Image (tube, grey):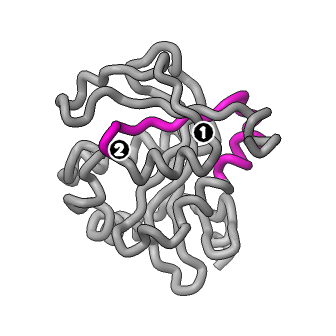
Amino acid sequence: MADKAADIVLETERLLLRKWRKSDIDPFMEHLNTRNVMRWLGGVQDRETFDAAMERLQGYDRDFGHTFWIIERKSDQEILGFCGLKRVNAPQPKLTGAHEIGWRLREDAWGKGYAKEAATACMDAAFTRWNAPYVVALTVSGNEPSRGLMKRLGMRHHPELDFHDPNYGPELNPTIVYKITADEWNSGI
């Protein structure tokens, strides 16, 4: 049990944000690699693509001390998705290396406040633990739920940072960038 406690990075009222375990992969693929969940994220992934993404997530944790962590519901230990921080590696030079917040939740967890609860904890950590001067979030115009959460977190759209990602087709372009500074977060803007 001590090993599992060591995996916990952040805790909220209802959630644990923790490091990935090998046992997370199959339930994650089952509940979060679906057509609806992946609609704005490039579509359902094959296992090879997912494994490559996992290697990148582990690399962020190793290199920077943060990544997109598993969201586990305390009441039943269900994996609801992920939320966390990574460094921007998208094709936008103005953002390279910036702190990026991201989340992905399974469909039966949508609309229950879990994403905001997890993202709020991650934002607090970005500015206190990792001293981020600002945090960005990336999305596309059609992903209204994510854009709504970005706004509820106090983030604002910065059109001058939007960019075209050649890895995706026209339905997933342009990438839209939201941003909040440490001062804005701390003042509750």
Q: Is residue 74 magenta?
A: no
- Badge 2, how many Cα within 10 Å: few under 14, some, many 20+? few
Q: Earlier in the sequence, mark 2 or mark 1?
A: 2
Which image quadrant is residue 8 in? bottom right
- Residue 47 on image: x %, y %: 22, 54
Per the rendering, the mark at residue 155 is 1
Amino acid on which the number 2 mark rests in the picture: Ala
Amino acid on which the number 1 mark rests in the picture: Met
- Please report the bounds of the magenta region as a residue range: 122-142
Residue indicated by mark 2: 53
- Residue 138 on image: x %, y %: 44, 36
The reply, left or right, for residue 163 in relation to residue 2 is: left
In front of the other: 186 or 59: 186
- Residue 161 on image: x %, y %: 48, 20
How many labels were placed on the picture? 2
Between tags 2 and 1, which lies in front? Answer: 1
